Image: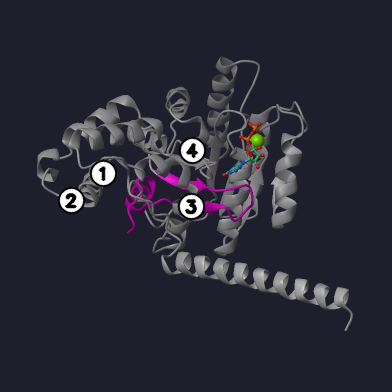
């Protein structure tokens, strides 16, 4: 064999060998990581990535990963004062609010933690946090919403523009349909151009009827017609959209009050549920939005959207506590399946990083 050919062959062997060793090393490192369950470990990090018992809880676990960062990264936590300071920072950054944060920090039994090893101190402090915050959240009923005898259950979605009202209606319609219920939609937002078409597109995808008026039509008239139609077709659930913005906020609240009066005329006691949709990304701002809507209409529950990727999960706890309303569903993405019921304890556990 000529020299240059042998040289080239040896070179190739050397390259293949080196590449092989690199691959083996990589495989070993990955294997170690896999055996550790993918956990990131360091002297100061106690983060875990283990999914939770129920599918909903495992979704929150990943949705709340940004909020959780501060609750899972502690340095020099052997010192109670350092742990307290960092826990305070984590609560504030999660947008739990100043007074809620002070309240929980004042109630954690710090003296009992002094003699514990660092990891135990952290775990116990977080466990106390969970047991203090969980009772702030209303436990939603399993059987919700209730089917009404001989008339449609009218559910109305309200909230400022862009929070996810229309998308939440579509997601919730999909949930009800999958449980075998009959559902109809009402395009109660006649103000924003194309709002009706947006809801109609969802209705087409879901294979259900959407009652909609002309753009600029009286939204109360659309809602009235939709209720009449749902009654005549024996529909179980009528999900109604609303405008998120009119010329100004006063007009919006007035229009909502009128909508409500007209719905009650079409069917006494309708709407049976008024759900306030709030965007979790807006943090404490959700509280002032809630105050405005609660003043105008008797909101019966909350739908919290865009939980996926928010770093302000603490504000979810804050707004639920402040309003005293049950969180009916959480939105975890833009597709029709991205909706989960709410459970207080697993949610708060996921928020602070305690595996349940
Ligand atoms: N990531 C994420 N996006 C969402 C979620 N819910 C809604 N969105 C998105 O938020 C945007 C606004 O949603 P809409 O449903 O149109 O909001 P709206 O409240 O009806 O808005 P208006 O009709 O303008 O008042 C859309 O791009 C949705 O896809 C959610 O849970 N997660
Ligand atoms: Mg809309």
Q: Which mark is on residue 117?
A: 2
Q: Which residue is mark 3?
A: 62
Q: Which residue is mark 1?
A: 135
Of discs 4 and 2, which sits in the foreground? 2
Q: Which residue is mark 4?
A: 274
Q: CA distance from mark 3 to mark 4?
A: 29 Å
For marks 2 and 1, the one nearer the N-term is 2
Q: With respect to residue 14, does 191 lie above or below?
A: above
Which secondary structure, mark 3?
Answer: helix
Q: With respect to residue 329, does 101 lie above or below?
A: above
For marks 4 and 1, the one nearer the N-term is 1
Q: Residue at x 20, y 42 (%)?
A: 78
Circle 4/circle 2 CB separation < 8 Å? no
Residue 3 in percent (x, y) is at 86, 77
Residue 64 visible in rendering: no
Residue 116 in percent (x, y) is at 14, 49
């Amino acid at each position: 064999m000529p020299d240059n050919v042998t040289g080239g062959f040896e070179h190739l062997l050397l390259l293949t060998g080196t590449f092989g060793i690199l691959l083996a090393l990589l495989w070993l490192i990955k294997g170690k990581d896999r055996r550790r369950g993918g956990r990131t470990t360091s002297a100061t990090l106690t983060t875990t990535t283990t999914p939770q018992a129920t599918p909903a809880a495992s979704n929150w676990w990943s949705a709340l990963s940004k909020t959780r960062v501060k609750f899972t990264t502690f340095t020099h936590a052997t010192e109670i004062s350092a742990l307290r300071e960092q826990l305070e920072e984590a609560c504030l950054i999660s947008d739990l609010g100043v007074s809620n944060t002070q309240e929980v920090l004042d109630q954690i039994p710090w003296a009992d933690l002094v003699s514990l090893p660092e990891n135990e101190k952290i775990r116990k402090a977080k466990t106390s946090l969970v047991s203090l915050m969980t009772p702030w959240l209303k436990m939603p009923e399993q059987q919700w919403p209730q089917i009404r005898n001989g008339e449609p259950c009218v559910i109305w979605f309200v909230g400022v523009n862009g929070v996810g009202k229309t998308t939440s209606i579509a997601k919730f319609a999909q949930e009800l349909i999958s449980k075998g219920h009959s559902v109809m939609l009402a395009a109660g937002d006649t103000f924003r151009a194309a709002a009706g078409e947006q809801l109609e597109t969802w209705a087409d995808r879901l294979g259900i009827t959407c009652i909609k008026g002309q753009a600029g039509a009286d939204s109360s008239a659309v809602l009235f017609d939709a209720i009449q139609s749902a009654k005549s077709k024996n529909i179980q659930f009528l999900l109604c959209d609303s405008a998120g913005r009119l010329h100004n906020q006063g007009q919006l609240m007035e229009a909502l009050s009128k909508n409500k009066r007209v719905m009650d005329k079409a069917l006494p006691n309708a709407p049976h549920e008024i759900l306030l949709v709030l965007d979790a990304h807006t943090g404490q701002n959700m509280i002032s939005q809630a105050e405005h809507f609660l003043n105008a209409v008797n909101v019966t529950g909350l739908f919290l959207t865009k939980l996926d990727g928010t770093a302000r999960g603490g504000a979810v706890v804050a707004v639920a506590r402040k309003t005293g309303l049950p969180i009916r569903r959480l939105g975890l993405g833009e597709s029709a399946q991205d909706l989960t019921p709410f459970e207080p304890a697993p949610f708060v556990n996921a928020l602070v990083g305690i595996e349940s």
